Every structure is written in C-alpha cells, then in structure tokens.
C-alpha cells in the first residue's frame, strides 16, 4: 500500500506523456489511435506491443504484459511502486509530496543504517578473538586480508544476543531489528534473538552501495549450510545479485554468473572482478533484466554437477528473452570455479573463459551425450534433434557453421542436413503462423488473457465474457463506473477474478479515489489482465446502453443458478431459500 496521495498520482499521469515515456525504451510507430513497437519485455520480431495514448495504457499481445505508465516503469526499470512514481516525478519535474517521501524514506533509511551497523559489527568481530573460528574458515578457503576487507566479510558469534545486544546499545529498537530480519521475535512476548549465529557473514550490497541483507554460512553441520536474509522493505532477493555493485565497475562488457558467494569471491580475488551470483535462489527474469542493463554478454559458470547443468539450461532460456549473449563455461576436473582456480590457477581459468562455448554449442553437446553415435539409430536420433535445434537459429551463417562441423563429426553430408533444416524451418514457420492467427482470433474477443487455462471461466463462459466486457468498458471509460456500480454489486459477479477486480474498482469509487490510483491497489498481473481486456476491445467504440446489456447478462446468472439449485434442494434448504428470496424482493 503506497502512501502517495491520489491527487499526486493523477497530476503525475497528466504531466507524463505515455508516448514520450515509452519512446525512451521502445521505437513506436503510429497505427490509427494506437502506437505499436517491439515489446521490451519479450523477444519478438513483429510488433505486438501496443500503447493506447487516450487511455494511458499499454498492452503486449505477445506476452500479456500490460498496465499504466507506472506499471511500465516498474517493469522496465525493475522498481517498486513508490520508486517508479519517484522516477516519473523526476522526469516530469514534479516534487513528490515531502512528508510522504519522509515517512517511507525515513523508515527504509533506518533499516539500511541498521544493516550497515550490523555489517560493521560482524566484520569487527571477525578480527577479534571472538571471531577466530570464522577467520580460520576463510583462511582455509585461501582468502586474503584484502579480499576479506573488500567484501566486508564477517562473523556472527554463536550466542543468542551478541548482535541484538550491540544494536540495542546503538539505539535500534526491537521492532527495527525484526523488520531488518537481523533478529527474530522470541516465543514469549517482547524478547528477540539473533537470526545469524555461529556463521561467516557475507553482506549483500545493492548497486547504490547500501547493505541490504546478508548471507551466512554455517560453520557446524546441522541447520542450513547457507542462511540468507528473507525479503525486507529494503531487500528483494529476486531483484539483486551478489557483488553486482563491484562487477558493474569492471571494464568488461561481460559478467560471469556463478552459483555461490564463495565462487564469486574466489573469482574476484583471482582478478575476475566481473563475477556475480544469485542469492541462494534460482535465477529470475528480474535478475536477467538487471544483468542486461550492465552487460552485453553473460558467461554461465554453474557447478558441473547435474543440478548445475539444469540451472544452466534454465538460465539460457531466461536470457533468450533479454538479448544478452550467453556463453557456457565447461569445467573439466573441478566442480566449481573456486576449486578450478585453486587447482589449475587463474591463467588456466582465463583460457577457459576465452574458450567457453556459446549456448548453442552447449545444447549440441547435451544432445550428443544422449545418443550413441556409434550406431545408425543413434546418429538418426541425434540428427533429428540437431535439425530441430538448428531450425530455431535465425542467422543463416551461424547455422551453416554448426551444420558443417556437426555433419563432419557424425559423418554425413552437410547438404543433406542443410536440406532437412530448410524443411524444418518451413514447417515451424507455418506452425508459427497458424498459432499467431489463432491467437489473434482469441484476442479479438474479450478475455484473451484469461482464456488460457481457467476452468471457472470455461464453465461460465457467457457470464465471464459479459464481465470482461464490462471491466474493459470501465478501463476505457472510467466515468461510467459510477453508473455501473449503482446497478451491479461485486458479489453479483459470477467468476472470482473478475469479481475481485470489480470490487477493487468499486472500492476506489466509494473512497472517492480516481482510477489513476488503480495500479497502487492491484497486483501487476491484475493490471496486465485489465489492460489486456481493454486492449482486446480497443477498436470497438463504446456504444450507449452497452453497459446495461452486460449487466443484464451477468445478473441473469442468479436466475439460472436458482433454477438449477431448486431442483436439487432438500426441504431445509428450500425453506431457507424462500425466506431469503422474500427478503430480497
Ligand atoms: Zn511482450
């Protein structure tokens, strides 16, 4: 829930031209009342990203991203609601109301200060006798003093209140410690205890240089090996990368994506200062967009075990959406970069980096390992998969290189493989066209987005479509909401998602808030859904009496339901229905 007044949001939207703002990210071409361009949120060759300047919406028919100008900035810049508003306000030359900035800002600032104090405490402890265990561990991993200092590594003592006690004397309250997730509330009442105990501590620093969270490695067995700060008001795991604040300063146009803190630190110590890692979770699309901001190329250097290879394939898929070039590090004789550097040295690792294979080569290698190429069946099976892979590569020259090499290795004629690839591409293209046409047909009716796998919608199709049209109308002509709200209540909606969103709209109306405030009260996916509905009907000019038709259809559900239910009612239900029916009329 944001604390920014609606009047300011309305003013901000009025002052920001959606066409101009979006144009900074997407080259837009006018098409009638709308503007179209290549979607910045997914990879496409024909434009399906559409801006509706009159409504102030955008919607992508390819990936379903949609919303208002604030949603757009949130997605494009990876920001939360308030940050997006702040950025737009700066762009429009408006000042965020002072007290709002203060209240939310002061709280965040306080949590960041608390984190910083904690990082100092951990780091100082490491250098003191109390931190001997931690220091011994880091030394055993061959980390030097300079590295320990540069990464601000530390040690959290084994007691229950070492950090808590220290921060309390520095004036931080119990509530602040708990909000910063440095402490947990005790079972009984007002106590709290340290969350990180007997662990080597890795502070997580964002690109602005704030300490936003911690990773802690256990020194004893029992409990999780790595414990990471949960998400807080100042920390979202899915939107941060370990050491990015250091890596972004390296001169390289590529980033090395490793699996863990220790890999990254070992890489930096060996001179590869462009290494980063995720924070104990699987890679997210938010992180790939973040990487796309700072690098043209990413080198995946996950562990060489099964899990690492699986993560590699997943990462290749995610990066395909961003335009970042992907290479995959193939390590022989070591399970991770840390071990590799220790065993073979930094020079060998550098050679490995330079020789690392592209994503396609990784995939070919993977396919090959699944077949026995000594047998004819194995060759046929492998070539079938290989042809499908090649058909997906748009660049003809690149295709040619792989085809010639692989054909030579398998011992077949490159021309034959080429011909198969040509046929496969033709087949895929016509399949793609059919799919696009089918999608377009679907989008032509309301509810395109919902149509994917929503059994509730399927069961109540007639009512769901009427609801969608009604929501679409409200999105395009918010001034009709008061008229509509007077005629149908949210609980009379048949399907749950539409009911929930209509209810959110009615709540805004009742509170006297403008529709501009919608994106501050509903989730981004819901915002995309609503603008999707509006987009599906954008070409249709609203007709007078249109709303009444939809409302009539939705309300007819109650009658239909009643008829069905009456048949199967027992006496008690029947009596109750009669009383309630009498009360209604
Ligand atoms: Zn898209």
Image: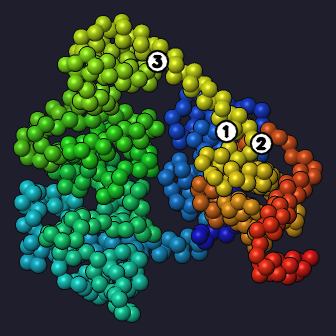
Determine contact: label 2, label 1, CB under 8 Å. yes
Q: Is residue 497 visible?
A: yes
Where residue 115 appears, as percent x and y from the top left, is 33, 72
- The colour scheme of the drawn protein is rainbow
- Identify the residue at image location x=28%, y=13%: 407
- Identify the residue at image location x=22%, y=15%: 409
In-image side of 271 versus 358 (left or right): left
The quarter of the picture where the N terminus appears is bottom right
Q: Secondary structure at mark 1?
A: strand
- Identify the residue at image location x=8%, y=77%: 129
Along the viewing direction, whichever of 395 and 87 lies nearer the viewer? 395
Give the mark nearer the N terminus: 2 vs 1.
1
| 123 up-or-down from 27: above or below | below
Which tag is nearer the camera, tag 3 or tag 1? 3
Which tag is nearer the camera, tag 3 or tag 2? 3
Category of crowding for the residue at label 1, using alpha-carbon neighbours closer than 10 angstroms: few (below 14), some (14–19), many (at least 20): many
Where residue 522 appears, as percent x and y from the top left, is 63, 62
Give the mark nearer the N terminus: 3 vs 1.
1
Residue of label 2: 538
Determine contact: label 3, label 1, CB under 8 Å. no
Category of crowding for the residue at label 2, using alpha-carbon neighbours closer than 10 angstroms: few (below 14), some (14–19), many (at least 20): some
Q: Secondary structure at mark 2?
A: loop
Residue of label 1: 50
Q: CA distance from mark 3 to mark 1?
A: 31 Å
- Label at residue 424: 3
Q: Quadrant of ligand 1?
A: top right
Q: Is the residue at mark 2 in contact range of ligand 1, meaning its CB lies under 8 Å from it?
A: no
Q: Is residue 35 visible?
A: no
| 400 up-or-down from 457: above or below | above
In-image side of 512 versus 156 (left or right): right
In-image side of 121 versus 445 (left or right): left
Along the viewing direction, whichever of 411 and 355 lies nearer the viewer? 411
């Amino acid at each position: 829930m944001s604390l920014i007044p609606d009047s300011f949001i309305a003013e901000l939207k009025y002052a920001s031209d959606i066409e101009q703002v979006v144009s900074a990210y997407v080259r837009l071409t006018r098409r009638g009342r709308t503007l179209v361009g290549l979607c910045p949120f997914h990879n496409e060759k024909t434009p399906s990203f559409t801006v509706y300047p009159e409504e102030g919406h955008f919607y992508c028919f390819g990936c379903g991203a949609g919303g208002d100008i604030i949603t757009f900035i949130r997605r494009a810049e990876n920001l939360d609601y308030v940050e997006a508003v702040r950025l737009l306000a700066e762009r429009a030359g408006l000042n965020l109301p002072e007290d709002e900035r203060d209240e939310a800002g002061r709280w965040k600032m306080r949590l960041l200060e608390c984190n910083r104090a904690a990082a100092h405490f951990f780091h100082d402890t490491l250098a003191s006798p109390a931190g001997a265990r931690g220091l011994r561990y880091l030394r055993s991993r061959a980390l030097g003093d300079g590295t320990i200092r540069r990464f601000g590594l530390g040690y959290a003592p084994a007691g229950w209140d070492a950090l808590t006690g220290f921060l309390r004397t520095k004036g931080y309250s119990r509530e602040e410690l708990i909000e910063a997730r440095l402490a947990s509330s005790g079972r009984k009442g007002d106590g709290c205890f340290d969350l990180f105990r007997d662990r080597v501590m890795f502070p997580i620093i964002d690109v602005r240089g704030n300490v936003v969270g911690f990773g802690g490695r256990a020194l004893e067995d029992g409990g999780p090996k790595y414990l990471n700060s949960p998400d807080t008001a100042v920390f979202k795991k899915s939107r941060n990368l370990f050491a990015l604040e250091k890596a972004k300063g390296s001169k390289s146009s590529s980033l090395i994506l490793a699996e863990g803190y220790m890999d990254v630190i070992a890489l930096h110590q060996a001179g590869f200062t462009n290494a980063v890692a995720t924070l104990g979770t699987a890679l997210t699309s938010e992180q790939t967009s973040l990487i796309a901001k700072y690098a043209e190329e990413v080198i995946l250097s996950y562990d060489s075990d099964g899990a690492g290879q699986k993560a590699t394939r997943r990462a290749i898929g995610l990066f395909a959406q961003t335009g970042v070039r992907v290479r995959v590090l193939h390590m022989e004789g070591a399970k991770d970069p840390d071990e590799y550097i220790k065993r073979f040295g930094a020079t060998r690792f550098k050679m490995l980096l330079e020789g690392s294979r592209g994503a396609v080569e990784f995939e070919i290698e993977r396919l090959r390992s699944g077949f026995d190429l000594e047998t004819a069946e194995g060759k046929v099976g492998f070539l079938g998969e290989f042809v499908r892979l090649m058909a997906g590569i748009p660049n003809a020259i690149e295709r040619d290189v792989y085809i010639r090499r692989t054909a030579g290795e398998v011992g077949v004629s490159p021309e034959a493989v080429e011909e198969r690839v040509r046929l496969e591409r033709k087949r895929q293209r016509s399949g793609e066209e059919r799919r696009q046409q089918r999608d377009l047909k679907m989008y032509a009716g309301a509810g395109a987005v919902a149509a994917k796998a929503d059994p509730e919608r399927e069961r109540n199709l007639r009512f769901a479509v009427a609801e969608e049209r009604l929501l679409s109308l409200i999105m395009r002509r918010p001034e009709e909401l008061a008229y509509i709200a007077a005629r149908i209540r949210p609980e009379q909606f048949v399907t749950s998602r539409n009911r929930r969103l209509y209810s959110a709209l009615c709540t805004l109306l009742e509170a006297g808030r403008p529709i501009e405030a919608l994106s501050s009260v509903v989730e981004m996916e819901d915002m995309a859904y609503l603008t999707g509905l509006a987009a599906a009907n954008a070409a249709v000019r609203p007709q007078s009496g249109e709303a009444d038709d939809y409302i009539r259809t939705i309300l007819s559900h109650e009658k239909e339901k009643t008829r069905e239910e009456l048949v199967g009612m027992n006496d008690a239900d029947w009596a109750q229905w009669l009383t309630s029916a009498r009360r209604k009329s």
